[in-house]
Image (tube, grey):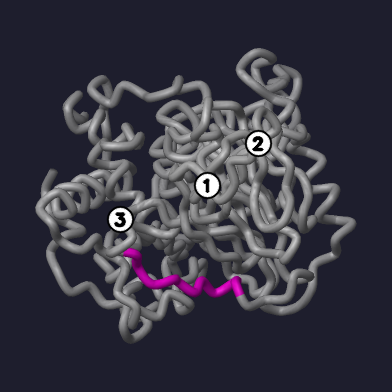
Amino acid sequence: MLSQQNNDLLTQTGPGTPMGELLRRYWIPALMSSEIAEGGGEPVRVRLLGESLVAYRDSSGSVGLVDEFCPHRGASLWYARNEDCGLRCIYHGWKIDSTGAVVETPNEETLLNARTTAYPVYEEGGLIWAYMGPPALMPPRRKFIWMDLPESHRVITKVWVEGNYLQGIEGGIDSSHVGFLHWAFTEGSWGNAGAPVISVKAPRLELEPTAYGFRYAALRKTGDDLQNVRITPFMLPFHTYVPSNRRDNNVWHAWVPRDDGSNWMYDVRFSIAGPFDMEAERERSRVIGLGSDFRPERTLANKHLQSREAMKTLNFSGIEGVKNQDYAIVETMGPIVDRTREHLGASDKAVSAVRRLLLAAVRACQEGDEPPGLDPSMPVERVLGVDTMIDAGARWQEACPLAPGLEHETALAMSEA
């Protein structure tokens, strides 16, 4: 159970809010590169941390991210002309460059001195990353393991989910839901008797603080001699990796606030072993059924196309697709779940830990400290989810040690809220 004050502190991310100020201290995904693939092409709207922005790629290939509304009279720059390294408002022809400076005011006799909000960006790994915090405190860029892979080795999915970003994170670090929500009745599927590891419905959770946040292990005994270990890393401010025992199927997640009631859920599925079969990937995406606005076809309005017949014969939830099942649960909770009414158990140990970590990070930031997880020497590229079998009596921390440089140095992660 969480106090209302702490629930508000964790979930409110707009300008001027404590959590909003913390998140703005990190480089965060703003959009996919493919959304503005054409130089000089149409601008796109970007809703991020409660702010309305537009992104565009100019004729030279550079990317800009600026306030959606023209600083003259507030017309939307989504409608603007993209020309000569800037956006020209169609209302009076004012031109704004990627720094937010007004460089032309053709309806005036002289250039007016004006500017608007603009954020620095860079492009890497198929995503455009934005920094929305104080310029003097801009952190170093982080190099995730999948960033240097060829495009044929990664598939990026972006989904507009109606629910606060924290609801998404808490689902992503909740191992015990896998054997229920994602339980399919086919042999060998998650939660089925043919897959004995996940059929253990009540894993034992153990946590370890790290330099990037924390990681936790879900431990499931599979016999007298072995135990399964599924290690999920949580990386500040809102990233995880799905545990995997394969080089050809790994997933990085990010839950980026659009506003307090919705989030952009990014999946980067990547293969270290070789290229994907893109036809199979298109079929995988078909199950989500995304519209041009990145909203899935399954919503609360149509009850996420849940089938009671499928609940009898196909899977536990009656909803097709693992991702759709996750989106549905986040949205059923409402825009912001009331955590004052919860009853947490041992299976929620990681959920409690992420709340403590984020609350401690917010308070440290308010006191003028550097947000955790931004050390430029930290080898972020060594972080990955793990799914493996070890001896029943072995310690998972020794069987799956942290890479040098990822060790925890302060008490921040496990401090009490």
Q: What is the quadrant of residue 400 in the picture?
A: bottom left
Q: Amino acid at mark 2?
A: Cys
Q: Amino acid at mark 3?
A: Pro
Residue pushed farthest bottom? 404
Residue bearing the label numbered 2? 89
Disc ID at residue 134? 3
Q: Nearer the viewer, mark 3 or mark 2?
A: 2
**In the image, 220: left or right of 373?**
right
What are the residue bounds of the magenta stretch? 138-147
Residue sitting at x 50%, y 36% = 263
Is residue 142 covered in magenta?
A: yes
Q: In which quadrant will I find the C terminus?
A: top left
Residue sitting at x 40%, y 51% = 132
Q: Please state the horizontal and vertical placement of residue 99, each as a whole percent of the image.
A: 50, 55
Q: Please state the horizontal and vertical placement of residue 414, each as a whole percent of the image.
A: 17, 57
Residue sitting at x 75%, y 28% = 313
Q: Amino acid at mark 1?
A: Val
Q: Please state the horizontal and vertical placement of residue 181, each as a whole percent of the image.
A: 56, 35
